[in-house]
Amino acid sequence: MKAVVFDVETSGLSPQQGHRIIELGAVKVEQGRIVDEFCTLVNGGAAIDPRAQAVHGISSAMLRGQPRPEDVIPRFRDFIGRYSLVAHNAVFDTRFLRAEFALQGFALPNAVECTLLLSRRKLRLPDHRLETVYQYFFGELPPDAQPHRALDDARLAAQIWLKLKKV
């Protein structure tokens, strides 16, 4: 099993309204193990909606001096190669990723799998938020995990994905 499990944090809820990816995190999974990681803040120049900032805690000040999308997206494209992509709530994350790829003149032909949909199909839980599904399989979140930060969420989603493949 090979895949890149990714997560994005964004300046708002809709790329069609000018919201952008402000953090991109991903882990490359091969034979059931994380073998590589990618993580960066992204300064796309978009104002951060206060509701989005309340979720992920990323401020405009944190984005000052960070790489621009035109630098990040080609690097991420190289990182994912032809691997299948996996995300929790993939519709949301993939919509933003496709929008950022398009702004840089790239397509995103990779297959995409959603751990949210998989968990809804396979598990009876009160909700299927990333933290809930992780806790179902593993108990408490790792003590150093920062929910709603891209790399930590990608790591959690990767572990969930590996478990869901066995259920």
Image: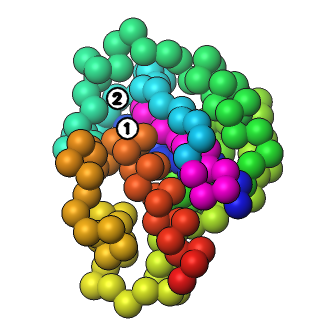
The residue identified by callout 1 is: 11
> Is residue 29 highlighted in magenta?
yes
Residue 131 position, x and y percent, is: 30, 64
Q: Quadrant of the C terminus?
A: bottom right
User: Element type at marker 2?
Assistant: loop
Q: Comparing marks 1 and 2, which lies closer to the viewer? A: 1
Residue 7 position, x and y percent, is: 48, 47
- Give the amino acid at mark 1: Ser
User: Element type at marker 1?
Assistant: loop
At 48% from the left edge and 31% from the top edge, which residue is drawn?
39
Residue 80 position, x and y percent, is: 70, 40
| Residue 8 relative to residue 58: left or right | right
At 53% from the left edge and 65% from the top edge, which residue is drawn?
161
Q: To which quarter of the image does residue 49 belong?
A: top left
Q: Which residues are magenta?
A: 22-33
Few, some or many residues within 10 Å of mark 2 (<14, 14–19, 20+):
some
- Give the amino acid at mark 2: Ala
Q: CA distance from mark 1 to mark 2?
A: 7 Å
The residue identified by callout 2 is: 47
Which comes sooner in the sequence, label 1 or label 2? 1
- The dot on residue 38 is none
Q: In the rendered view, would you say 63 is above or below 47?
A: above
At 24% from the left edge and 42% from the top edge, which residue is drawn?
144
Looking at the picture, tell me which residue is in the foreground, 65 or 130.
130
Q: In the rendered view, would you say 131 is above or below 17?
A: below
Residue 107 position, x and y percent, is: 78, 41
Q: To which quarter of the image does residue 138 belong?
A: bottom left
Q: Are marks 1 and 2 in contact (CB under 8 Å)?
A: yes
Q: In the rendered view, would you say 99 is above or below 33?
A: above
At 39% from the left edge and 50% from the top edge, which residue is drawn?
153
Q: How is the image coloured?
A: rainbow
| Residue 155 relative to residue 63: left or right | right
